[in-house]
Amino acid sequence: MKHILVTNDDGYESKGLLALIEALRAIAKVTVVAPSTEKSACGHSLTLTRPLSFIEIEEDFYKLDDGTPSDCIFLALNKLFRERKKPDLVISGINIGSNMGEDITYSGTASAAMEAVLQGIPAIAVSQVYAEQGKSIEEFGYTLAKQSIFSLVEKIFNETFPLSPRKFINVNIPPIPSKACKGFKVTRAGNRLYAHNAEVHYNPRGKEYYWIGLPELGWMDTKGHTTDFEAVSDGYVSLTPVHLDMTAYDEIENLGNWL
């Protein structure tokens, strides 16, 4: 039986994580290592300034005390899989909220997949786009996400992982019922429109503090290109191949000429 290592960035009790586990157990052995608390927007961070501990919740299900998603993958591969065959696949998700465009660089969900491919394991990051602060999840649940990831994993196991080393698939699920989905669409990452959404507050002693909010899901006009934003908006499950080489190759000559 194939073996899948699973994590997420919403914490080990996340409904999205539990939905992913349920979808995968019909097709593979599943080992779970997830953060003990929510680690959204933690990026590709490893914990270097304090020790971390595995806490076993049940068989093959662990939380990593105050660890990041990247910590979960790094330590799982180095501890839990040290003396046995490495997992056939790493899946991070189901994230509650989108991870599209440049948000991939913030994402703990995507970063767990990054860590996996750096360690030589094929990986998928899965995110459930929501509307109106989670209303779509309450209405539709994770049915489409579970169906989509099962279909992708089944195809991978029956054939092969479609990307070359150090690349992962970033999946975004539209906030619609499964019967309304138009299928899969291969996309490129779009370009987000970012706002400075930070609220100022004062504690009971008058000390000022800030709380960073969630920006609206807006993106730049990209006519002629199929982006993750456009695919999800049109009712498709978006599949974006992502690589970790961030070199701007089309600017190498310009930079050389500038020097």
Image (cartoon, rainbow, N blue to C red):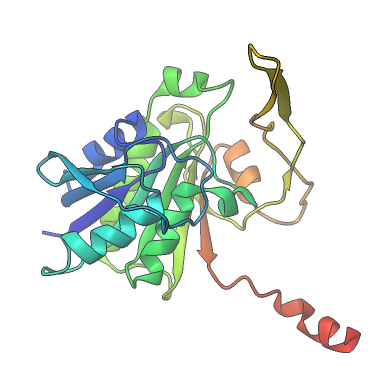
Q: Position of residue 203 (x, y in %)?
A: 64, 16
Quadrant in the rendering for residue 219: top right
Lateral position of residue 117 relative to residue 190, left or right: left
Q: Position of residue 74 (x, y in %)?
A: 32, 61
Of the 4 image quadrants, the one containing the C terminus is bottom right
Residue drawn at 51 percent across, 22 percent down: 134
Q: Position of residue 159 (x, y in %)?
A: 28, 67
Asked if residue 113 is positioned above or below residue 177 in the image, the reply reads below
Lateral position of residue 146 relative to residue 3, left or right: right
Looking at the image, the residue that sits furthest to the front is: 205
Of the 4 image quadrants, the one containing the N terminus is bottom left
Quadrant in the rendering for residue 105: bottom right
Asked if residue 185 is positioned above or below residue 253 in the image, the reply reads above
Residue drawn at 43 percent across, 70 percent down: 163
Q: Position of residue 60 (x, y in %)?
A: 14, 47
Is residue 172 visible to the viewer in this orientation of the structure? yes
Lateral position of residue 121 relative to residue 26, left or right: right
Residue drawn at 71 percent across, 74 percent down: 248
Is residue 152 visible to the viewer in this orientation of the structure? no
Residue drawn at 42 percent across, 56 percent down: 49
Asked if residue 153 is positioned above or below residue 117 in the image, the reply reads above
Looking at the image, the residue that sits furthest to the right is: 258
Nearer to us in this view, 56 or 206: 206
Lateral position of residue 65 relative to residue 217, left or right: left
State how many labels appear.
Answer: 0
Nearer to us in this view, 113 or 211: 211
